[in-house]
């Protein structure tokens, strides 16, 4: 009676595939977190630039301090306009 042992398999085993999948997920998460960090940095810079004197946020802040009820009314009307815009179905 002769027993033959199977030759080495060319396909990776389940453990190797799991390690490869975990490595791919880790790289993807790292890429996404780096992209998110870059976006937050750019947004923070834009907000800081807008808060400088003469910037948009600086102007809005000054107007809000001068007339808070009028600013609240304008914000309310803007919210209604955005909420009532027609929705298009794909």
Image: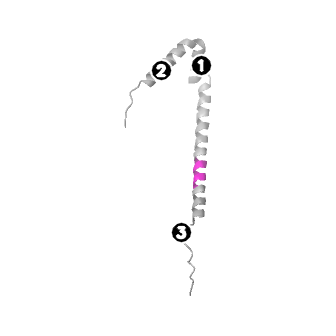
Asked if residue 14 is positioned above or below residue 79 in the image, the reply reads below
Q: How many labels does the image show?
A: 3
Q: Earlier in the sequence, mark 2 or mark 1?
A: 1
Please determine whether, in this image, residue 46 is positioned above or below residue 35: above
User: Could you tell me how far apart the alpha carbons at marks 3 and 2 are, in whole angstroms?
Assistant: 61 Å
Q: In which quarter of the image is the N terminus?
A: bottom right
Relative to 23, residue 3 above or below? below
Would residue 18 be seen by someone viewing this image from the given angle? yes
Would you identify the image quadrant in which residue 54 lies? top right
Residue positioned most to the bottom:
1
Which of the numbered marks, if any, corresponds to residue 61?
A: 1
Mark 3: few/some/many CA within 10 Å (<14, 14-19, 20+): few
Check disc 2 and report the residue beneath it: 78
For image coordinates 48% across by 22% down, the residue present is: 79
Nearest to viewer (mark 1 / mark 3): 3
User: Residue 84 in magenta?
Assistant: no
Q: Is the magenta stretch mostly helix, strand or loop?
A: helix
Name the residue: 44% across, 22% down: 81
Q: In terms of sequence position, does the residue under pointer 1 or pointer 3 come before the other?
A: 3
Task: From the viewer's side, name the closer residue of 53 and 88.
Answer: 88
In this figure, which residue is indicated by the disc labeled 3? 11
Tag in front: 3 or 2 = 3
Query: Tell me, what colour scheme is on the image?
Result: one colour
- Residue 38 locus on image (x, y percent): 60, 41
Label 1: how many residues lie within 10 Å, few (<14), some (14-19) or many (20+)?
few
Residue farthest front in this picture: 1
Magenta residues, start to end: 24-31
Is 6 placed above or below 55 here?
below
Marks 2,1: beta carbons within 8 A: no
Badge number at residue 76: none
The first of marks 3 and 2 along the sequence is 3
| Horizontal side, residue 65 vs residue 88: left or right | right
């Amino acid at each position: 009676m002769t027993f033959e042992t199977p030759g080495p398999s060319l396909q990776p085993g389940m453990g190797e595939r799991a390690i490869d999948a975990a490595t791919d997920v880790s790289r993807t998460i790292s890429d996404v977190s780096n992209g998110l960090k870059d976006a937050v940095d750019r947004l923070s810079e834009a907000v800081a630039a807008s808060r400088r004197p003469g910037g948009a946020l600086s102007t809005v802040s000054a107007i809000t301090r001068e007339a808070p009820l009028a600013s609240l009314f304008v914000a309310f009307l803007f919210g209604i306009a955005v909420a009532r815009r027609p929705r298009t179905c794909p």
